Image (spheres, rainbow, N blue to C red):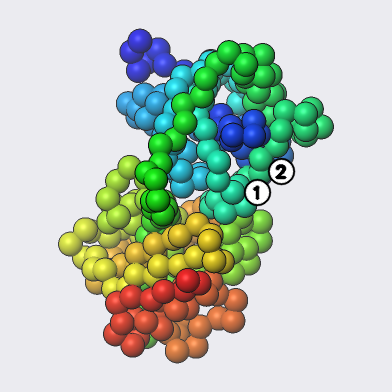
Amino acid sequence: MTVSDDPRGAAALLVDSRGRYLLHLRDANKKICDPGTWSIPGGDREGTETSREAVERELLEETGLVVPLEEFTVVDSLGPDGTKGRIRVYLGTWDGNADELPCPEGIMFRHFDAATVPYLTMCPWTKEVIDLHQAQAPTRPLVAAQARPGSQARLNVVGVHLYLEQDGKVLLGLRHPDAAFAASTHHFLAGHCEQESAIACLIREAQEEAGVAIAPADLELVHVVHLVDHPGGQPRMGLVFRARKWTGTPEVREPDRCVSWGWWPSDALPDKIVPYTRAAIEGIRAGRLYTELGW
């Protein structure tokens, strides 16, 4: 099969050892596919990606997980404008805590058993996939994730953050009230690394979120924050880069995530600010390169 013949959509059905399905509650009241329903992680292929490459990227972006996957089925779907499409679904196993997953898109992740699924507001094609899995589950083995005995290795979510300063003031964005993370709170311009270097990710995010153009040579790493929200939670590594120069005036390019950009004195930050953003700015002012939070 050529890439052009591959379904545009790709998704991952993750099942734990108790037979529960990892489901994702999608945003409501937005012009997206299946708004306000429980679905499974996934998205569209980008560029020349294969379905497998797309599902691995989407799974990492949406959950921070890297899980062995096998092809399972292909289902039909409808886009927000009623356009018909197809989704290739992959199957894998994961026994972690859904509450500890990052959720940069949508509302939340939860595990549900098959008996509960009929009582949920389900994405139609996801319900079709679960029904098919239930029909085949007794005879279809899952591909289990491999773990080394005694290993405590844990995947860390890597985020990049932009530190722009002019006249003693730092650029911060006020996040949308409905944002899944840090709603109505000030934060750096930031994003999660995809299949790209940290600097390439930050340059892309700066352009997409605020219309700011930065050359790679004008970025320098000025702080690292290693944090967990609570003991045992998903570890996060925040890389903060300072731009020595840039072009463009920051403007709101993603109004569903950020409602405004503003310059704040580095010694008089807003009260409602992401705690690790404040810690990073204070560390930069003090000349420290590294901060740990929540450990």
Query: Identity of the amino acid at label 2?
Result: Asn
The residue positioned farthest toward the top in the image shown: 1
Provide residue 159's location: percent of width, then percent of height: 40, 58
- Above or below, 243 against 139 in this view is below
Give me the residue at 33% from left, 88% from top: 286
Closer to the observer: label 2 or label 1?
1
**In this image, 253 relative to 98: left or right?**
left
- Asked if residue 84 shows in the view, the reply is no
Q: Nearer the viewer, residue 170 or 50?
A: 50
Total labels drawn: 2
**In this image, 275 relative to 1: left or right?**
right
> Dot 2 lies on which element?
loop
> Dot 1 lies on which element?
loop
Provide residue 112's location: percent of width, then percent of height: 70, 37
Query: Identity of the amino acid at label 1?
Result: Ile
Q: Nearer the viewer, residue 66 or 204?
A: 66
- Asked if residue 138 shows in the view, the reply is yes
Provide residue 133's location: percent of width, then percent of height: 62, 19
Give the residue at mark 2: 29
The residue positioned farthest toward the front in the image shown: 149
Quarter of the image where one finds residue 259? bottom right
Give me the residue at 47% from left, 71% from top: 295
Quadrant of the image for the N terminus?
A: top left
Q: Earlier in the sequence, mark 2 or mark 1?
A: 2
Give the residue at mark 1: 107
Q: What is the distance, in whole Å, between disc 2 and disc 1 at their CAs? A: 12 Å
The disc at residue 79 is none
- Above or below, 246 against 75 in this view is below
Mark 1 burial class by Cα count in 10 Å: few <14, some 14-19, many 20+ = some
Quarter of the image where one finds residue 216? bottom left
Give me the residue at 35% from left, 85% from top: 285
Give me the residue at 47% from left, 31% from top: 144
